[in-house]
Every structure is written in structure tokens, then in C-alpha cells.
Image (spheres, rainbow, N blue to C red):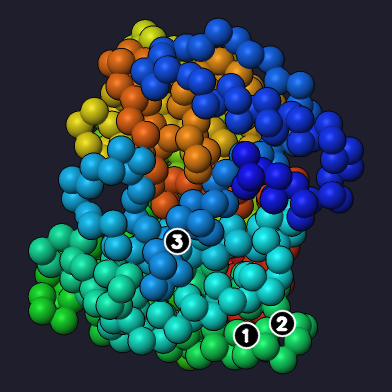
Amino acid sequence: MNRLIKMMNHSLSWGNYSMVLLSFVSVLAIVSCSSPKQEQATSNKLNISDDSLLTLVQYQTFQYFWENAEPVSGMAPERTHMDNVYPQNDKNVVTSGGSGFGLMALLVGIERGFITREQAVERYEKVLDFLETADRFHGVYPHWWYGDTGKVKPFSKKDDGGDLVETAFLMQGLLTVRQYFQNGNEREQKIVDRINKIWETVEWSWHTRGGEDILYWHWSPNYGWDMNFGVKGYNECLIMYVLAASSPTYPIEADVYHKGWAMDGAIARDTTFMGFETELNYYSGNEAPIGPLFWAHYSYLGLDPRNLKDKYANYNKLTINHAKIHYAYCVENPEQYKGYGEKCWGLTSSYSMRGYAGHRPGRDLGVISPTAALSSVPYTPEETMKMIRFLYEEADSLIGEYGPYDAFSFDNNWYLPRYLAIDQGPIPVMIENHRSGLLWRLFMSAPEVRTGLDRLGFTY
């Protein structure tokens, strides 16, 4: 309760203080009294506007990266289990990509009045202190570190070095922060300078393995290129190629994008699924031709798809159709899973009864991941609001301190109070892009990004 009142004290610009505060208190009361394994609570219609409800969701998910940050580094914990069960990671393990999302979420916090600009500056300084001394490899950061030491925690046996994809997500966040503070005071200008030094140190071209026409995901100081994962075909990694082409110090040639990522044009072999064109080739073979929904989020937290085109795709159409395919699939519900429908939808990589899994049509375990629908709000605003209303009015036991829990399954009677940084992070950012376009506007204002997009043949 005190947190909500404190947050409201920073948010008088919303309009009617008393009405919004009472609405937030009513939400808190509803969330607090629900049975943790209740399949579906009695409908509790909230006396709160869609706009205020979006602010509440942003506030809660923002707190994952603010109150819940690892205390030494200021970085985002890879996961937070409210049941205090940690089967894989210690509590002090932090993530590079998820922290990039969190850096953008802090900007939302400033603009929405959750924190002051000065509080954010202090946090960014702590994060930069960590990033300037933490393990990195040819300027490329690993997927995980120990937040208290900055030493790499291997993601797997051979994944103990540079992770170019996670680094791209982190750089997307850092460049967005840099653009926010570029005309700031002396202290903020130091943040800009420090981000530039980190950005210019990333050796994107190193990950071509000596000049191949493709980017490789991993390099290890102990295992070299053994993981041998060349990134090609459409997935969540578009931002990596854009930033690699944008680098002022270690850029890739355009052929790396066109011959590698775009597979000499084969990426443009689209299909129609659930009545919507996919625009690009997500999969080959007999799999359902669509990916998990985080593919429509991670690269587009900063990269604005609304006017983005290249010779392969219209990315506005691609991202909208991706979300609409998932919505249509859940409404049709071909596997007849309990709970799926117009108000309960969205498949993406998240927790499941079987551990972490990549949920999507064709690989559907009956698990709904709230981030899938909530982070799609720029693409499916009406459908997303139905999902948000469902969670907060009818299934409120699935809401915790940092917003909706990571995943649930009515069909399997499976609910755990757990969070993942990479799933919580896109929620406040994409909601803000829907509401104001803030993060899109900032990232796309970076001159290097425009140079990189031009180099690869994009219009925007």
C-alpha cells in the first residue's frame, strides 16, 4: 500500500489523483485476497480506465528492474522466484539481454513518474560501473554473470564467452538511454560518454569467424567457435544484424546480412497461416510456419517496425500478423486446451510444467505466457486489453508484485509465482511504445542506427 501511495505522489500528472488512487487500491485488494491456485476468480470489474490499468501494469513490471535489481550491479536478475525455489540459478545471477530491456524500462519509469530522473541517473551509473569491469570477450558480453563479481556464469558448458545476440539486446537498451540523455546536464553527459565507449568496443565483425557472410551467436575463450551457431532465417535476432551494420568501429558488410541472415533471399519465402501472411520464412519443413511471440518483441523494443521495410518484408505487417496469428490460434484452440480464447491468449518461450519451453502453434503445451499478449499491445491493442482485463479481473491470482507471473496452464492446473527478466522487460517497454512511441523514437534517433539501416537497404 505504501508503495502505491508513494508512486502516486510522483504521478499527479495522470489527472484525477483520488479516483486513480482508489482504483489502484481496489486492484491491490483484489490481487491480495485470491487463492494462489484458483483457476478463475469470480469476475471483479475494476473501476479503472484502460489507460490507468496500463499504467498499473507498467508500474508493476517496471519494479522487477527497479526494486528487484541485483544490489551490487544494479542489473536485472535472470529470474526471480517468489516461492524462493531456485532450481538453476543463484539469486545473484544477472542477465545481459534482460538488463538491456530493464534499462529501457527505467526510462518508462522516469516518464511515468515512478522514479525521478536523478534516481535513474544514479542507477545507470551503477550499471555502467558494472559493465565497464565485468567479463566480456572481444567487447561482447556473456549471457549471464554473477552480479556481485562480474564473472561470467556459463549458460551451458561451451557457452562461457561472448553472446552476440544478448549483447545486441543490451546495446539496444544502452543506445536508447544514451539518446535520452544526449542533451542533459554534465552528469548525464558522462553517462552518454561512458555508453559510447562500451558501444564502440563491441567487435561485431569478430563474430563473422574471419570474414564469413554470416554472424555467429557465440564465441568462447575455452572452446572457440565450437557451438557453431550461424544466425540465419527470421527469428528474434534482427536487431543484432542492424546494430552490427551500425557499429562505428567494427561494422559488418551488407553481404553478411543479405547472404547470411536473409539466406540469399530465401528468407522471403512466406506463407499464409490462420488466414494471415507471415511475410518471412520462419521455419522450414513440416513445422507450423510461425515463431513464438517474443520474436515480435525483442528486436522491436527500440527498432520501430511501423514504417520499416527492406526488399524482403514489410515489418509493420509482419509484426502485426505475427500477433494476430497467435490470437487467432488461441481463439480457435485446435488442441482444446482449457482457458484458451479471446480473453486468454499468447504463446512464447517461458516457463512450463516441463521447464523452459518455446511455446507456439505446433509446439503448444497448453501454457499461456502473459508477456506474449501484453507485449503485443502495439500490434493488437484491443485483443491485448481483453487479456489484461482478464488477468486483473478474472484470474487475479496470476498477478504478483512484479505484474503477471511468467506463465500458467489451466489445462494442467499449473501455476507458479515466478518471473523471468526477458519476459517481464518487454511489457512496460512495448506498452509505452503503444502509448507514446517513446522508446521507438529514442532508438531510431541514433545516427549510427540510421546509418546501419541505410547500409542494409532498409527504409524507415
Q: Quadrant of residue 23?
A: top right
Quadrant, the N terminus: top right
Q: Which residue is mark 3?
A: 69
Mark 2: secondary structure: loop
> Which class describes the residues within 10 Å of circle 1: few (<14), some (14-19), or many (20+)?
many
Earlier-in-chain disc, 2 versus 3: 3
Q: Which residue is mark 1?
A: 192
Mark 1: secondary structure: helix
Mark 3: secondary structure: loop
Is residue 73 visible from the viewing direction of this image? yes
CB under 8 Å between discs 3 and 1:
no
Q: Position of residue 270 (x, y in %)?
A: 46, 39
Label 2 vs label 3, nearer the camera: 3
Residue drawn at point x = 54 percent, y = 26 percent = 31
Q: Quadrant of residue 194?
A: bottom right
Name the amino acid type tagged 3: Ala
Between residue 23 and residue 287, name the one nearer to us: 23
